[in-house]
Image: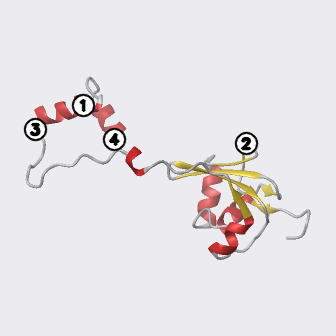
């Protein structure tokens, strides 16, 4: 694109490899996971050089400033030259709590074990359906 031209936001985030497919980019836009200059945008929103794009994916937020507009997907070394990455650093791996680990052969937890685990996780007093809903991704 020449100066003054624009590119669709879903196409651009795919072209600079922030997202794997253009259709995933469009879905992210429709789901409100993409913001341009603080505003939620539709997939066909026209990006311009200097726009700030915020993309929320996989539990972290990417913040990039558009440096160059491209329509076609390019290799990673070229893609990083098309934006300025202002994203906060990803959280350390220790911050993510590991799943509960049981000794091999220990079998299913007893009711008493489960209640103890719920108490330790701060889930005591919740009904089983509310307790289970909080553990699923």
Q: Mark 2 or mark 3: which comes first in sequence?
A: 2
Residue at coordinates 44% horizontally, 49% vertically from top-left?
A: 92
| Mark positioned earlier in the residue sequence (1 or 2) | 2
Q: Secondary structure at mark 4?
A: helix
Secondary element under disc 1, as helix, strand or loop, is helix
- Mark 1 → mark 2, Cα distance in angstroms: 39 Å
Q: Secondary structure at mark 2?
A: loop
Against 98, residue 132 (above or below) is: above
Q: Residue 25 location, x and y as percent?
A: 63, 60
For disc 4, the neighbor class at 10 Å (few under 14, some 14 to 19, many from 20) is few
Mark 2 vs mark 3: in front: 2
Mark pair 2, 4: CA separation: 31 Å
Mark 1 touches mark 2? (CB < 8 Å): no
Cα separation, mark 3 vs mark 4, equals 18 Å
The residue that disc 1 covers is 120
Contact between marks 4 and 1 (CB within 8 A): the answer is: no
Label 2 Cα crowd, 10 Å radius (few <14 / some 14-19 / many 20+): few
Tag 3 residue: 110
Q: In the picture provided, is 62 more to the left or to the right than 65?
A: left
Total marks shown come to 4
Image vertical order of residue 15 relative to residue 53, above or below = below
* Closer-to-camera residue (36/52): 52
**Residue at 79% of width from left, 65% of height from top?**
68
How far apart are the two marked residues, 1 and 3, measured between alpha carbons?
15 Å
Classify residue 44 as left or right of residue 131: right
Quarter holding residue 1: bottom right
Q: Taking 52 as reference, is 29 left or right?
A: left
Residue at mark 2: 38
Give the mark nearest the N terminus, 3 or 4: 3
């Amino acid at each position: 694109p020449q100066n003054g031209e624009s590119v669709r936001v879903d196409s651009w985030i795919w072209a600079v490899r922030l997202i794997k497919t253009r259709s995933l980019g469009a879905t992210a836009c429709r789901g409100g996971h993409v913001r341009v200059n603080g505003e939620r945008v539709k997939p066909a929103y026209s990006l311009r050089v200097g726009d700030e794009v915020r993309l929320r994916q996989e539990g972290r937020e990417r913040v990039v400033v558009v440096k160059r507009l491209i329509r076609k997907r390019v290799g990673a070394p070229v893609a990083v030259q098309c934006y300025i990455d202002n994203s906060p650093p990803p959280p350390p791996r220790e911050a993510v709590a590991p799943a509960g680990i049981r000794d091999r052969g220990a079998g299913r937890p007893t009711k008493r074990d489960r209640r103890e685990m719920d108490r330790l996780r701060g889930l005591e007093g919740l009904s089983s359906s509310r307790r289970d809903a909080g553990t699923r991704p």
